Amino acid sequence: MEKVVLAYSGGLDTSVCLKWLQEERHLEVVTFSAEIGQGLNFEELRSKALSSGASKVYIEDLREKFLNDYVFPALRAGAHYEDEYLLGTALGRPLIVKALVEVAEMEGAQAVAHGCTGKGNDQIRFEVGASSLNPNLKLIAPLREWSLGSREEEIDYARRYNIPVSASKESPYSIDKNLWGVSIECGALEDPWEEPSSEIYQLTADPGKAPQKSTYLKIYFEEGIPTRLDEKDLSPIELVTRLNEIGGKNGVGRVDMVENRRLGIKSREIYECPAGTILHLAHQALEALTLDREMLHFKKAVSQRYGELVYDGLWFSPLREALDAFIRESQKNVTGTVRVKLLKGRCEVVGRQSDYSLYDERLATYGKEDAFDHQAAKGFIDLWGLPYRVKAMRGGGK
């Protein structure tokens, strides 16, 4: 019997996948689960997988690796997708894929499988990632192959085989959670006119019901990496967890957007990313203080492209690796402290300082300490505008 390693979350899709791979494809199924901040109950998950027919269960705590090797590099890059999505789910996939392939190689499995739908982005991330790491592995996507046409039918299938799942026909939301945020879709959210119900939110308070008093935070970065919160050194897990708690309490980090999936479909997505929202804003403020104009402007284009690569499942691409080399160089002086204010869903930068600051108050001030040579500006303006004066003199001014 051939063996397959299934990326297993214990949710509706992967629970049904496990049984389907056994019943329909007659495969021995090994499951792999990664804890990256969703709060897995290891014993419960192991018991569920084994009782559903898994021959072996692998579960790994990859939270620290997730932040150090995936989230923080993306933060330094300023990575985002379509200006709003901070790539929480997208950043978790390459880490899971890498570990999945390693388990498959260790087990001598012929294939890996996932529980991604046939019209989402995650199937691309899993399959392109796995093929990039080991092109000899077969790729199985049950949701593209089986005859179950809806989540309601999957729920019926699970009940038929006595598989316990948390989704129900009354609450069919699909939720993916990790340390960097929560992605929520399906159900009533598929109508882009429908206001999200308060019940769907996992991390954030309703901004209207958040505390009336502002919360101030000081975040210290070392070469673009956050290492300290309010003068206290914290591990990556501690820092991100704390910011999620504080930001969530203040209603910070909610995103409701219609995005363009890689396959061409527009999809309405709800995201919660309190820590990500705070850290991205603070990091941008520190870059504005410490990077020169040309570097800062060029990096904005790199940030967008980096985000697209992550979103499109190309984490293991040569381009992403090359961009990381540029980003590391760009962050050498992005060291300092940023002060932010949180209030009822808003996050504002209210202060920034760095030993590498390029801001010179004597040049910026309009007071008596002004050291800027105002007379020098005229020569610059004359030269800057010279091509356009010549054009106008030749009759091409209109």
Image (cartoon, helix red, strand yellow):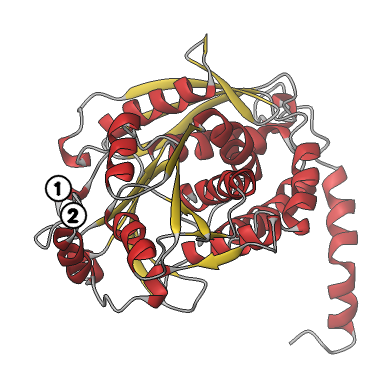
Can residue 34 be spotted in the picture?
A: no
Q: Is residue 149 left or right of residue 369?
A: left
Q: Of 398 and 300, which appears nearest the observer? A: 300
Q: Of 398 and 98, which appears nearest the observer? A: 98
Above or below, 216 relative to 42? above
Which mark sits nearer the N-terminus, 2 or 1? 2
Figure quadrant of residue 285: top right
Q: Is residue 94 left or right of residue 195?
A: right
Q: Are marks 2 and 1 in contact (CB under 8 Å)?
A: no
Can residue 137 be spotted in the picture?
A: yes
Percent across and percent down for residue 51 are 27, 44
Which quadrant: the C terminus?
bottom right
Figure quadrant of residue 42: top left
Q: Which mark is residue 199?
A: 1
**Which amino acid type corresponds to the residue marked 1 in the rendered image?**
Glu
Q: Which residue is mark 2?
A: 167
Q: Is residue 109 left or right of residue 296?
A: left
Dot 2 crowding, Cα within 10 Å, few <14, some 14–19, many 20+: some
Measure the C-alpha gap from mark 2 to mark 1.
14 Å
Percent across and percent down for residue 286 are 62, 32
